[in-house]
Structures are given as structure tokens and as C-alpha cells.
Amino acid sequence: MLSVFVPFDLALKKAVSPDLAALPENTVWIDMVKPTPEEDRAVERLTGIAVPTREDMQEIEISSRLYIENGARYMTATLMCHSDTDMPRTTAVTFILAGHRLVTVRYEQPKPFALVETKLGRSCAPTINGEMVLMELLDAVIDRCADILERAGAEIDQVSHDIFEPESERHGHAKQYSRILIEIGRKGDLTSKVRESLVSIGRVVTFMSAVIEGVKWSKDMREQLKTMQRDVASLTDHASYLSSKITFTLDAMLGVVNLEQNNIIKLFSVMAVVLMPPTLIASIYGMNFKAMPELDWPHGYPIALVLMLIAAIVPYWIFKWKKWL
């Protein structure tokens, strides 16, 4: 899918059904989502650049992600997507600055793109260009990462409270501990993905800072770029802090589980010791007494079977009631 944005009435509007054979010359931003070969050729004719393939975007070498080719600056970053679901993912997005046009190539739907499209669709600077759109996108991506980390931090605090809550408030230990361990694993995975995204964005910002030395960017844009560098550095440190906190929470959770298991094993050991003397006496004498009225009961055998069944059910019920199972 190809989206072409052109300035119109102090806003950046999406062109309706653009003609691939003649894309508008005043195009500022071209957003390519799962592009077809025809769309690739149309963009290459307009901008004079080579659109990278999906395989090219998956390369992890810095030289394959940040480079200049025929005067165009190629920057590939790893962005978060589906972060509000139980299956967050990362996706590679390529930003290409060709002249004063911005071309973005992606195969997922990161939320910052929709936010920036809506924001610029309401109002934008009359002299907007591709560099300004790129700054808006990077700023939105960084804000999105900050929001994800804030939410993850609050949820990790709640998990810590669930682990260290008073003993009297715990209910259903086995199911609760399983839920907590799953939650810790999900937060650890989310935090690691956000940190990977921040590191990638930080490299893009650093690359932009290096290549603008010979470019006439406004003072405000240069200051905004420095602010982004500071924000990325601080968020990366915060993501590392959350990772350490998640590791501590996991260790604490495993410690609590071990304590619970030790208490149960201790109870079983005590019960075994308590029942050992009666078992010893019964095994010595074999209960072979002449005066045993139960031997003459006509229903003694079925009664004994019922008593054995009750002796098996009652401990099981007690263990379930105590939340040991």
C-alpha cells in the first residue's frame, strides 16, 4: 500500500488514489506499507532512490542499516508494534531522506505513524519538508517507548505487591504464583524489546547528528535532535533499571515458591514421623487379637472399604482447603 502526503492549506493531506505513473512533484512524505514491485518502481522514478527489500531491512550490521547512497540517507530502525497485546513484536522500518522528501518503508503498523499522520493532517508548518516529518516520527516513537515503559513499570510494581502481600491475604497459591510468573515473563520480554528499539533509535539519531553537519538545518531542529538524544539515553537507562527490577522480582517469586514448597514438605515429614510409631506397633502385632468384635460383623468388609476410601478422601480435601494442591 502506498500513501502519498502533500501540503495543502497548512496541513499535510493524504493524496486520494495517487497515480503510480505520475506521483505529485510536491510530495513531502511517501509511506510504503508492504509495497508491491509496481509501487517500488513508481517511488524510485520520483525520488531517484533504490527502495530496500524486506531482506535488506532485516540486516543487523550498522553499515547495512545506516548509510548514504546517491545523496540519500538510509536509516533503518527497530520499532515496537502490538505492544498493547499479549504478543508484542518488533519490526524493521526504513526512513529514507531523499532531497527534502521522506520515504518510509515498513511491513507492520506501529502506532506512532498513525499518530503523526493525524497530527500533521490537522496542522503543520507551511514550509514542512521530509526532515520535519522525520523528526515528528522519531519524536512520536520515543514518546511511545516512554509510555510503554511507564505502563510496564506500574505493572511490575503491582506484581511486586502480589508477591510480598501479607500471608493472610493470599488465596489460591498455586494458580496465583503461576499467573505471577507468566506476568513477569511477559514484562521481561516487553522491556527487552523496548530497550532494543531504543538502542536502534539512538543509533538513528546519532547518525542524523553526524550527517547534518553539512546540511542547513534550523537551530530548532538541531536542538530537537539533541533533546532526542538525551531522551533516548535516559529511557535506555530506565529500561535497564526495569530489567534489573524484573530479575529481582523473578528471584523473589522463586524464593517464595521454594518457601511454600518447603513448608508443605515439612508438614508431610512431620505427619510421617507422627504416624510412624502407630505403624510400627501395628506391624509388630499384626492386629491379631482374639477379642476383635469387627471380625464377627456381617458387613465388616464393606465397612472397612468405606473407611479406607474416607481415609484417602479426607487428607485430599484438607490439602485442597489449605491451598496446598
Image (cartoon, grey):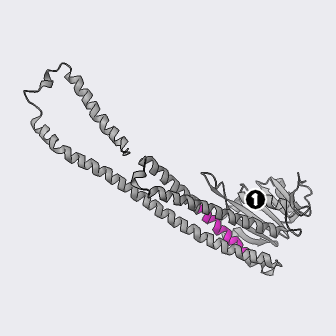
Place of residue 11 in the rendered image (x, y in percent of width and height, measured from the top left): 87, 62
One can see residue 293 in this view: yes
Residue drawn at x 15%, y 44% is: 277
* Residue at the extreme bottom: 213
Closer-to-camera residue (291/33): 291
Closer-to-camera residue (35/181): 181
- Name the dominant secondary structure of the magenta segment: helix
Residue drawn at x 34%, y 38% is: 317
One can see residue 77 in this view: no
Say if the magenta span includes residue 194.
Answer: yes
Residue range highlighted in magenta: 192-207
Residue drawn at x 58%, y 71% is: 237
* Residue at the extreme left: 290
Place of residue 20 in the rendered image (x, y in percent of width and height, measured from the top left): 89, 54
Residue at the spot of label 1: 115
Mark 1 belongs to which amino acid? Leu
Using residue 153 as the reference point, say whether residue 79 is left or right of it.
right
Q: How many marks?
A: 1
Structural crowding at the residue carrying mark 1, measured as other residues with C-alpha within 10 Å and reported as few (<14), some (14–19) or many (≥20): some
Closer-to-camera residue (122/202): 122
- At mark 1, the secondary structure is helix
- Location of residue 319 with respect to 309 vertically, above or below: below
Say if the magenta span includes residue 195.
Answer: yes
Using residue 191 as the reference point, say whether residue 289 is left or right of it.
left
Using residue 248 as the reference point, say whether residue 240 is left or right of it.
right
